[in-house]
Amino acid sequence: MNGLIALIALFSDVITPGLIINPPNEVSGFYSNGAILTPTKVALRDHLFFFHPERDRSYSSTRMAETLYFSTAALTELFPESESLGVGDISAQKGGELSGHASHQNGLDVDVSFYRSDFVAPAQMTSVVKNGVVSDDFDKLRNFSFIQIWVEQANAQRIFIDGAIKHSLCQWAYDAPELTSLTKEAKSEVLRRLRPYPNHDNHFHIRLRCPAESKKCLAQAEVPEGDGCDSTDQILESEAEGC
């Protein structure tokens, strides 16, 4: 895990908030009622692919695109045999309503696949939870490392997942020998951002905060303090806003 910290330090200039130029008024509105005024089209990279490129739902905010590139490159540097990250929907070119979703309207939401213990990229997003038990094919270390990057470097406010997956990570993270270089507070903050929500047993739904430069972007309420590990089977009312 020291390797991930070193990578974040080495490549932090890619996504350090002060060094990314977010266009003024890039996005507007709320996650479930918004638009992208100056969209960035996320491009294919060596370690990133789209499940359904024909849908043309690969438009995002600047920070979303840059973090997708950075996070996949960093994970591959740390774990060279890693499979490519599968990306589902982000937003339409100008944002707005997107079939199959209540949110994904202003370039600040993205669905991505889990990293698998068999190191094989899935042909489509498939569940890793059966009867409330998380499969061994869910690679805890690489998935935790991945979301750590988004929380610490990309201003991710929420990452929606199945409650059983959060429970599994809560049980593992604090005593994991691979995470000894992380403080308890750092682990808690990553876990805090994982928000239990139905129908998220086959992917991460990552949500970024509003860019400071987008004055018409409507923020969602902040998540409660604490890691939330004692309530992984509960869905707070604030989470239901436009997931």
Image (cartoon, rainbow, N blue to C red):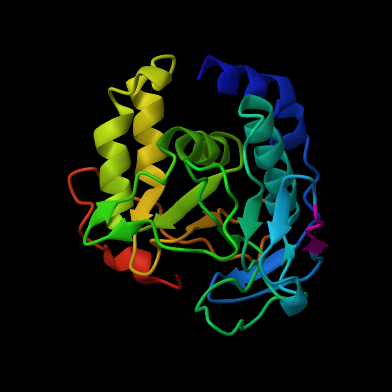
Part of the protein shown in magenta: 40-44
Position of residue 72 measured from the top left corner of the image (x, y, whole percent) = 67, 41
**Position above or below: 210 against 74:** below
The residue lying toward the viewer, choosing from 209 and 52, is: 52
| Quadrant of the drawing holding the C terminus | bottom left
Position of residue 96 measured from the top left corner of the image (x, y, whole percent) = 65, 80
- The residue under the point 28% across, 22% down is 175
Quarter residue 69 falls in: top right
Query: Does the magenta stretch mainly form a helix, a strand or a loop?
Result: loop
**Position above or below: 3 against 118:** above
Residue 226 visible here: no
The residue lying toward the viewer, choosing from 130 and 166, is: 130
- The residue under the point 63% across, 25% down is 78
Asked whether 92 falls inside the magenta stretch, the response is no
Q: How many marks?
A: 0
**On the rendered structure, is 106 left or right of 148?**
right
Residue 237 visible here: yes
**On the rendered structure, is 52 left or right of 167?**
right
**Position above or below: 152 against 123:** above
- The residue under the point 70% across, 65% down is 27
